[in-house]
Amino acid sequence: MVWKTVAGVVVAGHQIASGRSKESPYPRGSIEMQIPFFKELGLDLSSDYPATLNVSLRPAQFVVQMPQYTFHGVKWSPEHAPEDFSFSPCRLSYYSRIYGGWVYYPRPETKLGHFQDPGTIELILPRILGIQYGDRVEVSIRSEEILIVREGEESVWNNDQP
């Protein structure tokens, strides 16, 4: 298993995952509502912050290939049809600290709305005090699970890490 690292910038998301959007139908946030379902399926996210950290990798984009987990038909909300979710381990480097977490990927083929830019990756991580929109970070992912590409290139990586 090889970890690959790419630079990114923290950006605002739709704020549905955290419940901060005034238009969110989920005051507690969708992630907090989903966590018990993922735990029942074998992925315990209860020690992570119940929201996503959105990181723009632009001009790069990412392609989920062989994630560690894919859960099909998760009926986490009575207001929505079941959705599929994929998760892949990740590391986030912020001011020389490394945080382990997960790439959160609601599968677009089953998601009803709030689609992400293909250059923005959503991460579920422990709470990171002080992190703000515009902060530069590095995201490390397993290259066999997620591919990072620039238009016209096969892949782009800063380095290899065991």
Image (tube, helix red, strand yellow):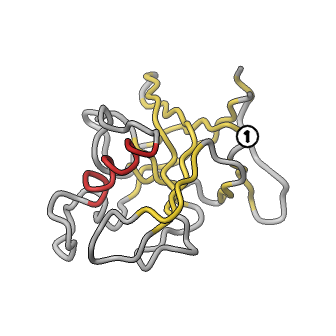
Which residue occupies the foreground of this view, 119 or 67? 67
Considering only vertical position in the picture, is 33 above or below 99? Answer: below
For image coordinates 53% across by 69% down, the residue present is 117
Q: Amino acid at mark 1?
A: Ser
Q: Is residue 28 left or right of residue 148?
A: left
Which residue occupies the foreground of this view, 23 or 11? 23
For image coordinates 37% across by 66% down, the residue present is 75
Displayed quadrant of residue 54: bottom left
Q: Is residue 149 left or right of residue 27?
A: right
Displayed quadrant of residue 108: bottom right
Q: Looking at the picture, how far across and down is residue 97, in whole percent?
A: 43, 22
**For the residue labelled by badge 1, is the local secondary structure a helix, a strand or a loop?**
loop
Which residue occupies the foreground of this view, 151 or 14? 14
Q: Quadrant of the C terminus?
A: top right
Mark 1 is surrounded, within 10 Å at the Cα level, by few (under 14), some (14 to 19) or many (20 or more) other residues, namely some
Q: Looking at the picture, how far across and down is residue 60, in whole percent?
A: 67, 57
Q: Looking at the picture, how far across and down is residue 1, in whole percent?
A: 74, 28
Provide the residue designation for mark 1: 143
For image coordinates 52% across by 32% down, the residue present is 91
Q: Is residue 112 left or right of residue 66?
A: left
Q: Is residue 108 left or right of residue 11?
A: right
Number of numbered discs present?
1
For image coordinates 85% across by 55% down, the residue present is 154
Q: Looking at the picture, how far across and down is residue 72, in whole percent?
A: 53, 61
